[in-house]
Image (cartoon, helix red, strand yellow):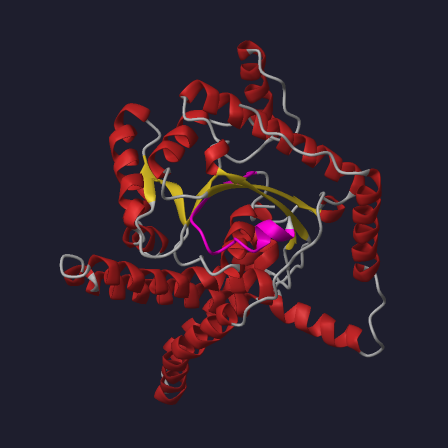
Amino acid sequence: MLILIKPYRQTVWRQHFRQCQDCFIADRKEPKPGTTDKMGLVQWLKGQFLCHLIICYGFLVSGLLVNLLQICTLPLWPINKQLARRINCKLGYSLTSQSVALLEWWSGTEVTFYTDPADYQTYGKENAIVVLNHNFEIDFLCGWTFCDRFGVLGASKCLAKKELSYLPVIGWMWYFLEMVFIKRKWEEDKRSFVQSLQNLRDYPENFWFLLHCEGTRFTEEKHQISMEVAEKKGLPKLKHHLLPRTKGFWVAVQNLRGTVAAVYCCTLNFRNNETPTLLGVINGKKYHPDLYIRRIPLESVPEDEAECSSWLHKLYQEKDQFQEDYSHTGCFPGPVVTPPRGPWSLINWIGWTCLLLYPLYLLLVQLVLSGSILTILATVAFCSAGPRKWRQWENLFK
């Protein structure tokens, strides 16, 4: 079974192209007099080591506190499993939304959504499998932003390496949120993978299961190897994607039938050939991502494994064509339908920061009042050496 996509009329494409031109013109508008210096000062502050230190400190310490609260829910699981799940969703949101706030409020990056207005009405009101491309360093942040805009960030699920479940903060949080952990060895993963998916069938919140079917981030080297495999298998070559790994997708679809209503095919790209990085976001750099979302009813996905595999390959061929069109036009098909930014991620982030900085402030005051020259000199040395080491680390990953 193949996916049938209705071709857009020429007039519609022209309309979309004009919309993209309007967006680019809006981005290039001259700033009002007097605002340039203020913006320059704010941007300079965002690039300072002390701000980065506060961000990392807040995320790690709040993460450990969230982990502690999640551990406290353990006695509740045998008594009221659904209540424990709901509590863990809220706790997970309080940590994950800090990353969304970092992207949207700190760096000023706002994802533009292209989608059918009729499909837009269903987002956040149903369970879904979300198929994302894996081309960029911050595509996971854009995926979380998509989840947050429609109120499912706390209940969003994904595939993760088993080793991550042992790490504090993110790993422990994901363990309590019932993420699907795998070892990437199918014979060992099959049973646990199926069991994890079956556990989601009675989940009390609407959830989205985020999948990067390519399995790894796109690089030129990986792309070349992937296309050699495509040639051997007689599959059409892709220009902007790796070959999707079909088995995991098929197992997910089979085990979530009756629970999940649709597949959301998401294609992400950035305007002006931007190459976004996580360090750029931390430094407050603004990016311009566009996300094209198509809703495909799960009933249209074949049940047979071979047919489902062909269906997914066809889906990625279409995604590849959308990326190719984007490289020429600078926009995706479909109207722009973007929900406004909610304040909760920002409120949560500010709340955690204030809560955790207060004891740090008291410690600093006590340090100064103690009069210990050695301790004060050690603190000054750390603050002086920190920015230099941070810049070296930034250059290493550029």
Q: Give x and y (percent) for residue 187.
A: 28, 23
- Of the pair 304 and 157, the residue shown nearer to us: 304
Q: Seen in the image, is 192 located left or right of residue 308? A: left
Compared with 191, 348 (above or below) is: below
Compared with 150, 296 (above or below) is: above
Compared with 320, 86 (above or below) is: below
Give residue 90's quadrant in the image. bottom left
> Per the image, is 43 magenta?
no
- Of the pair 335 and 352, the residue shown nearer to us: 335
* Residue 199 in view of the camera: yes
Q: Give x and y (percent) for residue 137.
A: 56, 45
Q: Seen in the image, is 366 located left or right of residue 391? A: left
Residue at the image position 26 percent from the left and 27 percent from the top: 188
Compared with 153, 213 (above or below) is: above
Q: Give x and y (percent) for residue 76.
A: 17, 62
Give residue 256's quadrant in the image. top left
Q: Give x and y (percent) for residue 119.
A: 58, 49
Looking at the rendered structure, the number of numbered marks drawn on it comes to 0
* Residue 130 in view of the camera: no
- Of the pair 385 and 361, the residue shown nearer to us: 361
Q: Seen in the image, is 291 located left or right of residue 182? A: right
Q: Seen in the image, is 59 located left or right of residue 8? A: left
Range drawn in magenta: 117-134
> Per the image, is 129 magenta?
yes
Residue at the image position 67 percent from the left and 68 percent from the top: 43
Which residue is farthest bottom?
Answer: 369
Residue at the image position 37 percent from the left and 37 percent from the top: 257
